Image (cartoon, helix red, strand yellow):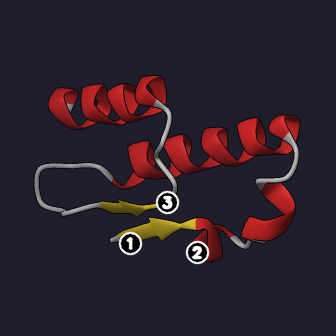
């Protein structure tokens, strides 16, 4: 499964301008990645994962799955 801003219906330009909107976007990305993770599915999170803490959260979700 491919999870990105377009999949979620977000406009990248609009959401990356404001830090509050960016947090909403990250939360949505994280929850959708978590929903799609299982032992049978490959999940690709195609986004600006430039924040180390967010990348680590995604790593922990994948490791726990």
**In the depicted view, which residue is nearer to us: 47 or 29?**
47
Q: Is residue 47 visible?
A: yes
Callouts 1 and 2 close, C-beta under 8 Å:
yes
On residue 2, the disc is: 1
**Earlier residue among tags 1 and 3:** 1
Q: Residue furthest left?
A: 39
Which residue is labeled 3 in the image? 47
Q: CA distance from mark 1 to mark 3?
A: 10 Å
Please indicate whether residue 19 sits to the left or right of residue 39 in the image.
right
Instruction: Report the mark closest to the observer, 2 or 3.
Output: 3
Question: Which residue is drawn at the image coordinates 34% and 26% (left, top)?
Answer: 56
**In the depicted view, which residue is nearer to us: 53 or 31?**
53
Element class at badge 2: helix
Image quarter where the C terminus lies is top left
Question: Which residue is drawn at the image coordinates 88% and 44% (left, top)?
Answer: 18
**Residue 19 position in % (x across, y down):** 82, 36
Element class at badge 3: loop
Which residue is labeled 2 in the image? 7
Question: Which residue is drawn at the image coordinates 48% and 42% (left, top)?
Answer: 50
**In the depicted view, which residue is nearer to us: 39 or 62?**
62
Question: Which image quarter: residue 9?
Answer: bottom right
Question: Which image quarter: residue 7?
Answer: bottom right
Please indicate whether residue 12 sits to the left or right of residue 7 in the image.
right
Element class at badge 1: strand
Other-residue count near label 3 (Cα within 10 Å), few / some / many at <14 / 14–19 / ≥20: few
Other-residue count near label 2 (Cα within 10 Å), few / some / many at <14 / 14–19 / ≥20: few
Q: CA distance from mark 2 to mark 3?
A: 11 Å
């Amino acid at each position: 499964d491919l999870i990105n801003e377009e999949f979620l219906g977000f406009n990248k330009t609009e959401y990356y301008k404001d830090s509050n909107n960016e947090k909403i976007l990250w939360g949505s990305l994280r929850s959708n990645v978590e929903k799609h993770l299982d032992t049978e599915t490959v999940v690709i999170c195609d986004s600006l994962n430039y924040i180390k803490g967010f990348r680590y959260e995604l790593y922990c979700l994948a490791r726990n799955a």
